[in-house]
Image (cartoon, rainbow, N blue to C red):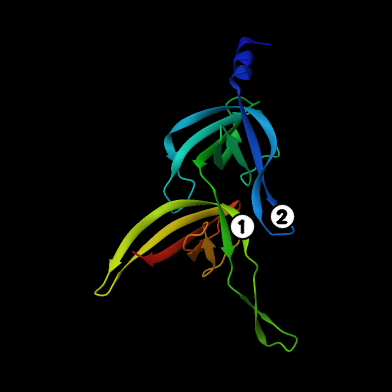
Amino acid sequence: MSEMHEQLSSALTEKIEILTLVLDDETGALSWVSERKRWAAVKLDSQRNLFSAVGVGARGVTVTIRPDRRLTLRDAIRWNGEFLHLTAISMGAERDRQEIRAAICHPETLTAKPQDRTGRDARNRPVAIPQAAYTFPGILAERYYRSEEDEVFRRETLERVLVTPKAVELRTGDLIQQGDSTPYTVLQRLDLEDYKNEYVIERRRDA
């Protein structure tokens, strides 16, 4: 084994976990589950990773591993207790290395409360079809904040960008709740990426 190859092998000294999204068939809940472990080299980037099309970026990292053909941008990584949202996968400078760009994020367990959908009964009449609530992991990114004030009262409008796995499909008007706090309402859906969805959500409350 050459000295250079030894140096490359020894560089992969950090353990990471490859996470995959799992659906609970009984509850409909989605969650990240550790599927396998790898040795890696992890380097913090000097620039922020713009993992969201309309949200504020996060601290970026570059992860180098031996090639893993099963790895896709639909997966995630846990490193040193941090959750890494994957944004790019490419072959490294050396053929036996794979380079992954990711953003250090903090996913929340959120509850989706979809609005009733419109369906048809046996006589082809429109009927409301209730949709079950379910939990899923989502990343809340900052967009902007504003205050409104009138003669009677002041209300705060808080907008966030919600980044989710592709499996999370929400519609305008659906509610998203974080714990027991006031729910957000989905205002806009951005679903052009084939591995994630983004939503602009809004929460209003008396200030």
100, 159: nearer the viewer: 159
Label placed on residue 24? 2
Query: Residue sitting at 37 percent across and 64 percent down?
Result: 157
Q: Could you tell me which residue is drawn at 45 percent across and 38 percent down?
A: 59
Specify few, some or many for label 1: CA neighbours under 10 Å numbering under 14, 14-19, or 20 or more.
many
Residue situated in front as seen by the camera: 199 or 91 = 199
Instruction: Relative to 77, say whether 190 is above or below.
Output: below
At label 1, the amino acid type is Thr
Q: What's the CA distance linking mark 2 and mark 1?
A: 10 Å
User: Of the residues shown, which amino acid type is indicated by label 2?
Assistant: Asp
Q: Where's the N terminus, which quadrant?
A: top right
How crowded is the residue under tag 2: few (<14 C-alpha within 10 Å), some, or many (20+)?
A: few
Q: Residue 48: x percent and y percent?
A: 43, 39
Q: Taking 84 as reference, is 2 left or right?
A: right
Q: Where residue 175 sits: x, y (%)?
A: 53, 66
Q: Position of residue 40 (x, y in %)?
A: 61, 27
In the depicted structure, whether residue 122 falls above or below residue 96:
below
Q: In front: 189, or 126?
A: 126
Q: What numbered label is drawn on residue 135?
A: 1
Q: Secondary structure at mark 1?
A: strand
